[in-house]
Image (cartoon, rainbow, N blue to C red):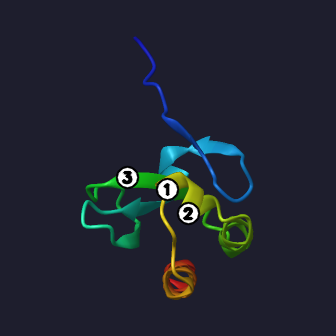
Amino acid sequence: MTTKKIPMRQCLGCREMFPKRELIRVVRSPEGEIALDFKGKAPGRGAYLCKNPACLKKARKSRAIARAFACEVPEAVYDALEAQMEAQNGQ
């Protein structure tokens, strides 16, 4: 019996590799809208973050999300991402 390969992705904040299911996907939709994708199914370009809010802060400071998407990310988007992440961790 063959074992199923687990897809690995790198966190933008801590730069460590994790299984894809353990990370939160940040997606830039084809319309240019940036949001968190907890299911991992939204269309668009994706980048991944740990579920740790500290990783979002590191990514925000180093502008890693802006580099990953090759576009400017407004501060309001970071604030919304932080609020969504804290709400998801609180559940």
Mark 3: give few (<14), some (14-19) or many (20+) Cα within 10 Å. some
Q: Residue at x 35, y 61 (%)?
A: 39
- Spatial separation of the CA atoms under disc 3 and disc 2: 12 Å
Mark 1: give few (<14), some (14-19) or many (20+) Cα within 10 Å. few
Q: Are marks 3 and 2 in contact (CB under 8 Å)?
A: no
Q: Are marks 1 and 2 in contact (CB under 8 Å)?
A: yes
Name the N-terminal-most of marks 3 and 2.
Answer: 3
Residue identifier under label 2: 66
Q: Is residue 10 above or below residue 42?
A: above
Q: Residue 87: x, y in percent?
A: 51, 86
Mark 2: give few (<14), some (14-19) or many (20+) Cα within 10 Å. some
Q: Residue 31: x, y in percent?
A: 25, 67
Does 84 sit left or right of 61 as displayed? left
Q: Nearer the viewer, mark 1 or mark 3?
A: 1
Q: Amino acid at mark 2?
A: Ala
Does 31 sit left or right of 36 as displayed? left
Q: Residue 84: x, y in percent?
A: 48, 83
Q: Are marks 1 and 3 in contact (CB under 8 Å)?
A: no
Q: Residue furthest top?
A: 1
Q: Is residue 13 above or below residue 9?
A: below
Residue identifier under label 3: 45
Can residue 23 be seen at all in this image of the molecule?
no
Name the N-terminal-most of marks 1 and 3.
Answer: 3
Q: How many labels sit on residues?
A: 3
Q: Amino acid at mark 3?
A: Arg
Q: Residue 53: x, y in percent?
A: 67, 75
Q: Residue at x 56, y 63 (%)?
A: 66
Query: At numbered mark 1, what does the secondary structure look like: helix, strand or loop?
Result: loop
Disc on res. 70: 1
Figure quadrant of residue 56: bottom right
